[in-house]
Image (spheres, rainbow, N blue to C red):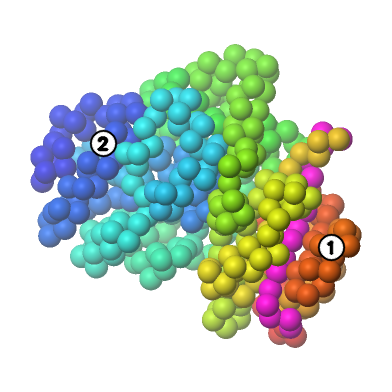
């Protein structure tokens, strides 16, 4: 069977990250052509937001696994359509800077989803969740195929059958930290300059260059990053800062993106408890509210249009940006719903939360549009609270019996 999927010889030649990625789409095509075979397929799936951390950690873990058990098929699955990859500007920047061809990756389109479900139905799918610990989106219902988890979010307590050998959920700044730790412990010889820089990127980006001031970095992030830097030829703090800032600049470079693109660039969706019949969405956007207004004259039309297209009941937009005047990191929060009752209970609860929200006063023209819709704009003075904190808070709010 191995010959069908490229043969043992090509497996042995896949000792670099680039050569591994170059074979991914070819192997996937062979799997789709031979769905009646009995070969097990090991898939490493990142979360549906598919930020740099999720993309890199799923690829790096699949690569490590492919080198530890070369007789098996190990592939990363990027949880977005291929057309959306260019929205991840920090990801395209990192791949291009390392001369890695991301066209060879496997993306989640209808065909890929059907293949995954066919593999699951025939008990051939072995699914590892990376950068999340519960199946999301179109993958719900494949619980029996989950064989592993590596994540840094709040443990939702699912898949109790998995033991600690295959389930790692730790409070670190970046899921890639946990994957890099595995590479260091299981096969450190894989860490050449290319792979080391590849995994170092999201660790620096997610921890704001390992700066404790932002409340995201943990000791393990620092320990792992320090081991990677010499191999990645990041020689000193100047090199580290330049590498981080290049990724940060690419991530914040939204100059060519429309409002729809900005909202879907880093977007996640969850059911509203307790009945779970409606959904809410959270978009992370790297623009301040005033900057977005200056860029998009039809904001008050485009936001409702996106909500309707997604079929959700309420949307939260988390704005994260650097204030151009003070050079300090800032957060703002926008939320909108057509459901007046849902909007009001959400606003009331969030104002009492530790997000430390402060109303943003709009100019007269925007204020008049604002008043005709259930939409609010706030400064978020608790800058440490990201989507990782907002999502559990919302679940808690909506699960309260009075709501």
Dot 1: within a 10 Å radius of its alpha carbon, few (fewer than 14), some, or many (20 or more) residues?
A: few
In the rendered image, residue 279, in percent from the top left (x then y), is placed at 57, 73
Rendered view: 237 above or below 324: above
The residue that label 2 is drawn on is 23
Q: Quadrant of residue 155?
A: bottom right
Rendered view: 22 above or below 348: above
Horizontally, is 171 left or right of 403 in the view? left
Q: Nearer the viewer, residue 111 or 195?
A: 111
Horizontally, is 81 left or right of 27 in the view? right
User: Magenta stretch: residue 333 in it?
Assistant: yes
Magenta range is 326-341
Q: Nearer the viewer, residue 6 or 261?
A: 261
Label 2 vs 1, first from the N-terminus: 2
Rendered view: 335 above or below 202: below
Q: Which residue occupies 62% across, 54% down?
A: 259
In the rendered image, residue 243, in percent from the top left (x then y), is placed at 60, 24
The residue that label 1 is drawn on is 365
Count all numbered tags in the image, as a single digit. Answer: 2
Q: Which residue occupies 17% across, 47% down?
A: 30
Q: Which residue occupies 62% across, 37% down?
A: 253
**Callout 2: SS:** helix
Q: Which residue occupies 30% across, 56% down?
A: 112
- Does residue 353 show up? no
Q: Nearer the viewer, residue 260 or 136?
A: 260
User: Magenta stretch: residue 20 in it?
Assistant: no
Q: Quadrant of residue 225?
A: top right
Residue ranking furthest to the bottom: 402
In the rendered image, residue 263, in percent from the top left (x then y), is placed at 60, 56
Compute the Cα span from label 2 to label 1.
54 Å
């Amino acid at each position: 069977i191995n010959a069908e999927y490229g043969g043992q010889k090509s497996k042995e030649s896949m000792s670099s990250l680039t050569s591994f990625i170059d074979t991914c789409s070819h192997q996937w095509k062979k799997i789709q052509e031979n769905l009646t075979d009995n070969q097990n397929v090991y898939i490493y799936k990142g979360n549906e937001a598919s930020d740099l951390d999720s993309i890199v950690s799923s690829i790096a873990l699949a690569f490590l696994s492919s080198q530890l058990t070369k007789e098996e098929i190990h592939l990363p699955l990027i949880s977005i359509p291929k057309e959306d990859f260019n929205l991840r500007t920090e990801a395209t920047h990192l791949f291009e800077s390392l001369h890695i061809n991301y066209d060879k990756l496997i993306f989640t389109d209808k065909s890929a989803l059907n293949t995954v479900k066919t593999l699951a139905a025939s008990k051939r799918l072995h699914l590892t969740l990376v950068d999340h610990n519960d199946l999301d989106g179109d993958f719900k219902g494949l619980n029996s195929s989950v064989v592993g988890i590596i994540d840094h979010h709040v443990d939702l307590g699912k898949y109790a059958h998995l033991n600690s050998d295959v389930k790692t959920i730790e409070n670190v700044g970046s899921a890639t930290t946990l994957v890099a730790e595995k590479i260091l412990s299981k096969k450190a010889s894989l860490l050449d300059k290319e792979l080391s820089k590849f995994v170092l990127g999201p660790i620096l980006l997610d921890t704001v260059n390992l700066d404790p001031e932002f409340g995201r970095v943990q000791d393990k992030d620092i320990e792992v990053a320090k081991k990677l830097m010499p191999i990645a030829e990041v020689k000193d703090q100047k090199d580290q800062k330049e590498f981080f800032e290049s990724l940060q600049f690419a991530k914040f470079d939204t100059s060519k993106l429309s409002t729809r693109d900005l909202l879907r660039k880093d977007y996640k969706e969850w059911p509203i408890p307790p009945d779970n019949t409606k959904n809410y969405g959270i978009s992370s956007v790297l623009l301040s509210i005033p900057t977005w207004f200056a860029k998009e004259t039809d904001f008050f039309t485009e936001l409702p249009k996106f909500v309707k297209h997604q079929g959700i009941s309420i949307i939260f937009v988390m704005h994260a940006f650097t204030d151009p005047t003070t050079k300090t990191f800032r957060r703002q929060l926008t939320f909108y719903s057509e459901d007046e009752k849902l909007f009001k209970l959400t606003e009331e609860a969030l104002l009492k939360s530790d997000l430390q929200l402060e109303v943003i006063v709009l100019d007269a023209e925007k204020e008049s549009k604002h008043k005709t819709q259930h939409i609010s704009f706030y400064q978020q003075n608790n800058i440490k609270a990201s989507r990782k904190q907002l999502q559990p808070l919302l679940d808690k709010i909506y699960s309260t019996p009075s709501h």
